[in-house]
Amino acid sequence: MTQPTKSIFLNRLDKGTLIACCLAVAAAQLCITVPSPINGEIQAAFGASGSQVAWVTSAFILPTAILELNFGVVGDLFGRKRLLVLGGLILALGELLNATAQSIGMLWTGQALAGIGAAALFPSSLAVIAAATPDQKDRAKAVSTWALSISLASALGPLSSGILATVADFRWAFVPPVVLGLIVAVTCWKLVTDSKAPEGRTLDWPGQITIAIGLTALLWGIIEGGERGWSSTAIVGSLSLAAVALVGFVVAELRAASPMFNLELLKIPSFAAAAVVALAGMFGFIGTAYCVSIRLGAVMHLSALKASMPFVILQLIPLLLAPVLSRMLTRVDARWLLMGGLLPMAAGQFWIAALPITTTSLAAFIGPVLLLGVGFICVVSSLTSAAVNAVPIHMTGMASGATSLVREFGQGLGPAVISTIAMSAASSALVGKLSGADAGMEAAAGPLAVVNAGSESARAAAQDALGHGMALGVVICGCASLLGAVVTLLLVRKNTTRSEVDTSGETAVHARARGTWRTPSAYAQEEEAGAQAPASSSCIPRGFVRTRRGRS
């Protein structure tokens, strides 16, 4: 067990810690992108319906979104190094279940377990970096390297899974994440210099439990509603449970001494608008990616490698734009960067919707994919900035964490909603066009089953119907991006009332809530790490608790 040393303020980030943290976040991000090009193989191997395939992505993202805020607190309380090691091991275990999955249910379980590991890795890796870089320039450089690791993993994930699923069984696509998770655990244990900041940090169990139940029930109801029927007892019960749990979350946060999320933030128009944009933008982006993966893999039966190419191009764009964006973020208002991202995204989405379902040429996808990639990186880069700039300085950490939760829930919601819409529209388009065994197959397993195993005429009809459904789904994604652009234009504004008082070389930021105050370095650490910083919590000291590497 590591022994804490005295609290210190000035320190520097060592290379070993930076390397380990970059590996950790790369492993978490890689796991998000691995399933994209192999959804078709997953559907064919397990005979899965559209909603079942949608759960492959949502099962990973949901626990990541739900647990990320409180895992940030756990790291502050018990040490971020321990959480990094544990996160790497849990992620590896989840991906091992994926690599040996014999059913779609086992794959969901593996994805959910890996998502829990990712929820530990994302905030902990960034918190370690932020805590060890009190100097603004050092922190910016380190965080840029951390973000570059995310971009590299985003590009390598679909490429590796596409290659492995083409030359071997699709389950091999989950083997590299297993190895990477173990490497992360060992590397973090050996190289990371631990840090924690337990003062004033407490876990909000009522808030955590109610938000977990609420979001899970909501997502399950939406995904299953299209197949089970919106009036079925299970769906009505699930959506009712979601409503009750989310109301319970609001009550819990109003009563909590140290809430996960201060509801007063929603009274700030710019922050509320940024939250809407995060939800709508990520909903549209991931919903579009889901439709592209299904149409290329499950409908048009391209190889996993060919199906991965649009995703590789999409994820390489952040690497090319990173130097430009780093300068723009300091010179251009986040409002205009958001607009400059959402509008190209919408254009790319409407372009994809207009492509005939039989289009399989990579050249046809390059244009809209480039627009999507440029839009996505602009939106992601400026979202947190727009959110934290809208709130008082003492709430920037909480604003960043809450925006992250909403953004990731939007990513989980995208495949869920778009799958339901697309498959329902396709089933409606097939009414009266199938007969005999083909009609029975569609009633039992949906249009994806028909396009893969029906008669020749039935497959052609199912392909046209799925083309209609997918186009409708992507149009809705484009409308979500346009909605985000309108909300941004009307409501997102920079907070001009934020101020800092300079005193004798060190600026002290005074928080009005309950008379507490914190140093600018503490706020910067919380903002970069996405950790919650409730106005009602007790004072965070000037430094952070740093422990020696190795064992005592």
Image (spheres, rainbow, N blue to C red):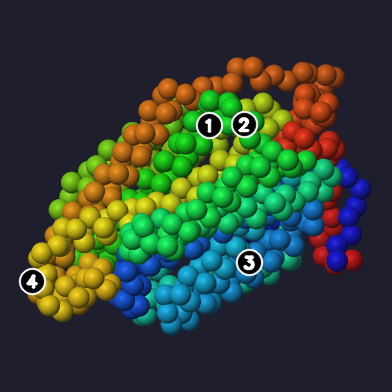
Whole-Å distance between the Cαs marked 3 and 4?
49 Å
Q: Looking at the image, which residue is at 26% across and 58% down?
A: 424
Q: Where is residue 287 in the image (x, y as percent from the top left)?
A: 36, 51
- The residue labelled by disc 1 is 272
The furthest residue to the right: 6
Q: Looking at numbered disc 1 in the image, what kind of residue is underneath it?
A: Ala
User: Counting residues from the N terminus, which is met first, the one under dot 2 or under dot 1?
Assistant: 2
Q: Looking at numbered disc 3 in the image, what kind of residue is underneath it?
A: Gly
> Helix, strand or loop at disc 2?
helix
> Helix, strand or loop at disc 1?
helix
- The residue labelled by disc 3 is 88
Q: Position of residue 419 (x, y in %)?
A: 33, 57
> Helix, strand or loop at disc 3?
helix
Whole-Å distance between the Cαs marked 4 and 2?
56 Å
- The residue labelled by disc 4 is 457
**The image quarter in which residue 112 lies:** bottom right
**The image quarter in which residue 547 lies:** bottom right
In the rendered view, tell whether residue 87 sits above or below residue 199. below
- Would you call the spot at circle 2 few (<14 residues within 10 Å), some (14-19), or many (20 or more)? some
Q: How many marks?
A: 4
Whole-Å distance between the Cαs marked 2 and 1?
7 Å
Q: Is residue 158 visible?
A: no
Asked whether 129 or 47 is in front, the reply is 47
- The residue labelled by disc 2 is 265
Asked whether 531 or 551 is in front, the reply is 531
Q: Looking at the image, which residue is at 73% across and 40% down?
A: 255
